[in-house]
Each structure stands twice: as C-alpha cells, then as structure tokens.
Image (tube, grey):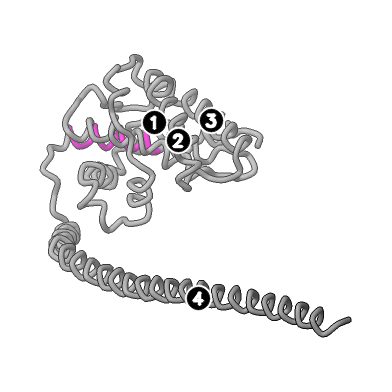
C-alpha cells in the first residue's frame, strides 16, 4: 500500500473519530439539559410538597378550632342530659298515654328480639335487628312518641307470631346468600333495603291491619345512625331523644307491660317456633 493510500485511510478514520466525538458531545449536552430540567422539576415538587404540607396543617388547625365550639356545646348538653336522667327527671307525659306508648314499644322490641333469635341452634342476627330498627324508629316509634294514637298497639296482636315467622325467614334467606353481616357499608346497601321494604309492605300491614302510603316516603336511618344508637348509649338522649324517651317509658312501666300486654306468653311461643338453620 502506498503512502498516499495510507494517508487517505488515516484521514477517513480521523473524520469518523471526529464524527463520534461530535455525537458524544451532542449527547452530553442533551443529557445535561435533561438533567437540569429534572432537577428543576424536583425542586418544584419539593416546594409544592412543603406548600401542601403547610396547607394541610393550616386546614387541620382551622378545622379543629371550628369544631371545638360545637363539640363543647354537645358535651355540655350531653352532661345535662345525664344529670337529668340521674336525678330521675320525669317525662312530661300522663300515665295513660305513657303506658300505651310503653306497651307498643315493648311489643315491637319483643318482635325484633324474636326475629333476631331465629335459629334452633342458637344463631342470632343483631345486624338484621339493626336494619329493622332503621325503619321502625322513624316510621313507628317517632310517630308514636309524637302522640299519634293510630300507632298504639296495647296488646300483642294475633298476627305478631306470623310476623316473627316471616322475619325469621328473611334472616334465614340473608344468611344463605351472604355470610357477612349487614354492618359493613356494602352489605348494608345491598341487603338492608329488602328488610326495610318488608316491614313497610308486609309486616306493618299485618300488625296494623292496613298500610299507610306515607311510610314509603319516610327515610330509614343510615347504618352510621343505627350503629351510633347501638354503640353510644350515652348519646341517645341527645341524638335520638324521642326513641330514648320511649325506652325510658318501657323501663318505667315494666310491671304493667308484663301483666297487660300478653308478652310473656308471646315470648314463650316464639322460643318454641324457631327455625332450622
């Protein structure tokens, strides 16, 4: 190979090396630019994180400040209610009216207890009892406590045992389609409406001998509300005053209820008619 040919090859090689070097420099500039952009973005995100954290802290402080005043008022009212109960403050209600209300609530409570204790093997359904209370509290108990005599049931009606039987069938069906109780939001939303509609369209008409279309317009209590009733007895007087007063009447007239409503015999019959699981 001649010197000229060697020079030509060396020149081409040097040119290729220069091209590679130019490409590397270009990539370095591109990467450096990208790294600078990423660092700038990281800095912006860190600043945003600090701003969000500060905003959350400010909101927490403002919310706590806003809630403290009504919370203190609620605590004061609750303490007053406890003191009144401890002092035996009488309900402003005459004995005859109070006894009729007490009898009615005691009968409904016994029906619910019998439905909940549905199985021969001792299974219970307190979750279904809550679903029953969610509709009965606004539809029956509150109307009764407001003075509606149409809702008085002075003695156990003949249809009560049939209501218990059908209620237990509802429980047995629910246990067959779902092993999870109704106290989770998903199962409550799926199954509680069936229990609520059963009371409005079947059980209450059986007990009262007629159906009231206004029942369809009443809003049942939510799962949160019935759980509060169950789990926070100290707040019942404050948040469920009518229902609380009704339960107080049941306690006051316990002896008359046992003697004049027919409940002892009814309770005995419900024990003997529990279902196979």
The picture places residue 178, in percent across and down from the top left corner, at 60, 39
- Which dot, 4 or 1, sits closer to the camera? 4
Give the class, few, some or many, for how many residues have Cα within 10 Å of label 1's Cα (few <14, many ≥20): some
- Give the CA separation, mark 2 to mark 1: 30 Å
- Vertical order, 19 against 81 (above or below): below
- Inspect the magenta stretch and tell me whether residue 135 lies in it: no
The picture places residue 190, in percent across and down from the top left corner, at 49, 36
Q: Which residues are magenta?
A: 97-109
Disc marking residue 170: 3
User: What residue is rendered at 34% in x and 27% in y?
Assistant: 155
Disc marking residue 262: 1
Question: Can you see residue 87?
Answer: no
Give the residue at mark 2. 192
- Give the CA separation, mark 2 to mark 4: 66 Å
Q: Are marks 4 and 1 in contact (CB under 8 Å)?
A: no
Q: Are marks 4 and 3 in contact (CB under 8 Å)?
A: no
């Amino acid at each position: 190979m001649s010197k000229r040919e060697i020079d030509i090859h060396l020149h081409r090689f040097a040119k290729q090396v220069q091209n590679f070097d130019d490409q590397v420099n270009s990539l370095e500039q591109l990467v450096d630019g990208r790294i600078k952009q990423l660092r700038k973005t990281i800095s912006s995100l860190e600043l945003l994180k600090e701003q969000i954290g500060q905003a959350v802290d400010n909101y927490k402080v403002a919310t706590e400040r806003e809630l403290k005043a009504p919370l203190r008022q609620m605590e004061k009212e609750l303490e007053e209610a406890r003191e009144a109960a401890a002092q035996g403050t009488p309900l402003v209600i005459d004995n005859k009216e109070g006894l009729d209300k007490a009898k009615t609530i005691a009968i409904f409570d016994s029906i619910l207890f019998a439905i909940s204790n549905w199985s021969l093997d001792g299974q219970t359904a307190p979750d279904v009892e809550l679903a029953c209370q969610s509709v009965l509290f606004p539809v029956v108990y509150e109307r009764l406590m407001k003075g509606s005599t149409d809702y008085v049931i002075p003695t156990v009606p003949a249809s009560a045992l049939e209501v218990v039987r059908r209620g237990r069938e509802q429980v047995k069906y629910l246990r067959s389609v779902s092993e999870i109780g109704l106290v989770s939001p998903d199962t409550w939303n799926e199954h509680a409406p069936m229990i609520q509609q059963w009371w409005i369209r079947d059980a209450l008409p059986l007990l009262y001998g007629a159906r009231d279309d206004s029942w369809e317009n009443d809003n049942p209590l939510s799962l949160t509300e019935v759980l509060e009733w169950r789990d926070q007895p100290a707040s019942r007087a404050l948040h469920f005053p009518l229902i609380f007063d009704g339960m107080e009447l049941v306690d006051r007239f316990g002896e008359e209820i046992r003697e004049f409503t027919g409940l002892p015999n009814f309770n005995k019959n419900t024990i003997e008619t529990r279902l196979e699981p």
